Structures are given as structure tokens and as C-alpha cells.
Image (cartoon, rainbow, N blue to C red):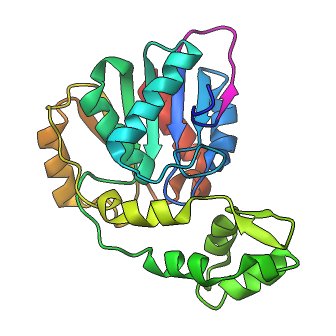
Amino acid sequence: MANLLNYKLYPNNHTQTYLLIYHGLFGMLDNWHQIANKLSVYYNVVTVDLPNHGQSPHYTKMTYESMTENVIALMDSLGIEKAHHLGHSMGGKMVMKLVDLFPEKVSKLIVVDIAPRAYTPVHTPYFNALKNLDFSKFNSRKEADDALGLVEKNIGVRQFLLKNITKSHSGYSLKINLSAIEDFYPKMIDAIRFKNTIITPTMFLFGGQSNYINALDIETIKAQFKTVLFHEIENAGHWIHAEKPNETLESIIRFLD
């Protein structure tokens, strides 16, 4: 099926249990490769490029609801009736909508460093930089990195963003559907509005140095998610899977067992 989301399967021939993993804004499935590979000792793991990201299809309109339908179509194509689901940041909001609309498809849910509330638009400089840079004129990734460095001083963030460019017939070009993602951005960072109370076992996993989940968020989450626990990864920020991979891995396995 041509319109299926791009994915990578880490198979395990000794179990029928599946775990699907979803990245955040400007991310792609290989952001979780290290952890997915280790988790495949226990489960069949599927990492997914969300719409307009990575190598997944481009759509002019993005919504969390349409993303969940894309996920269900992928599960159906792989013969997966029910699975664990893990989402980071934007992917975390998507899996909250997934469990709300399709609870029968979710065994356990892991939401990584995001709450269902609205957030301030902190990514606007990245949208502007990716729109305004003419990647076709760059002869190397170093040139692209130098140009992006005028906007973002953190080399780790630049390297993350530059994973979204690919060699073209003339210089480089963007792999992502930037205009559609930017159009979706106000809704992306808006609050998730639930149709149902969530009874699926859920873990919110967050960084101790991140400001994406606070004490007020925890109380709000407890009111919406009736079987929920919280686990803080000390000395980690928003990118806990990159900053503290071993602790993140252990927390996932402990919750899913």
C-alpha cells in the first residue's frame, strides 16, 4: 500500500508482543534506533516516521486524528491487532489521541516528556531558518551547518535538524513537508481534548531537568488517565532517550513487563 507510513521492524521471533515507537517534531524513526534495537530482545519493535517526516508520505493537511488513522492502517497492514505504543513529544500527543480514539489497539501506553496541555510556540526560529535557507546552494553538510549556526548555537540541535536534508541534484533539499508541518504547528502545540477517560495502563516518562511536565500537569493527567504512573529520569532534559538511554530503556522494560 503506497500511502502507508514508513517504518522499521526490529523483529523478535520468540514473542507476539509489539511495541510501536513514534518520534517528535522534526524527528524520524532512527532517532530511537539505539533503544529500539535493545528493546527487540523483549518485543517486536516498530519505529515509525510520522506523516510529513522522514520517508513517510507527504500530506497537505495534518491532524492528530489523521495521524492515528495512519497508525491504525499501518498496524492492520502488519497484522498487529493490539500493541504497546510509545510516543515522544509530538509523538506523545499523538499516542494520547490514539488511546482516546482507539483504546482497543493499545495494550500499554508510554508518553515521553509531554503533557496534554498547550505549549508556547518555541520552534518558530527553526521553521524560519529551514524556510529561508537555500539548501540547494550548499556543497556540503558543513556549509549547511555553518549557515544554520547563525540561528542555533547548539550543535546537537543543528545536527538533529540537519538530519532532515538530503543530497539533491543541486546541493541539498528538505525531506520533510515543512509547509504542512508549519500549518499544523498551532494545533500540534495546542491542548489535547479527550472524548473519553483513559483507563489503559499509562506511564508518563519525563526528564528531571525538562520543563515539559510540571506539578500542575501531573494533577491534570491524573484526572484524565485513571491507571497512570510517572517516572522521572534524573539529570535529563527533553531528549531523555538520547541523554539517558540506559535509564530510559530500563524504565520502559520495567513498565511493560
In this rendering, the count of numbered labels is 0
Residue 13 covered by magenta stretch: yes
> Where does the image place residue 57, in percent across and percent down from the top left?
59, 44
Give the position of the N terminus as an image quadrant.
top right
Q: Residue at x 54, y 52 (%)?
A: 52
**On screen, residue 134 above or below 167:** below
Q: Residue at x 45, y 12 (%)?
A: 81
Residue found at the far left of this picture: 223
Left or right: where 232 falls relative to 46: left
Q: Residue at x 78, y 76 (%)?
A: 136
Residue 194 covered by magenta stretch: no
Q: Nearer the viewer, residue 201 or 52?
A: 52
Q: Which quarter of the picture shows residue 64?
A: top left
> Where does the image place residue 249, in percent across and percent down from the top left?
56, 39
> Where does the image place residue 7, in percent across and percent down from the top left?
63, 34
Q: Nearer the viewer, residue 102 or 207?
A: 102
> Where does the image place residue 239, in percent across and percent down from the top left?
52, 59
**On screen, residue 228 above or below 152:** above
**On screen, residue 139 above or below 32:** below
Q: Residue at x 44, y 47 (%)?
A: 91
**On screen, residue 232 above or below 8:** below
State the extent of the magenta-drawn residues as a range: 7-17
From the image, give the main secondary structure of the stretch colored magenta: loop
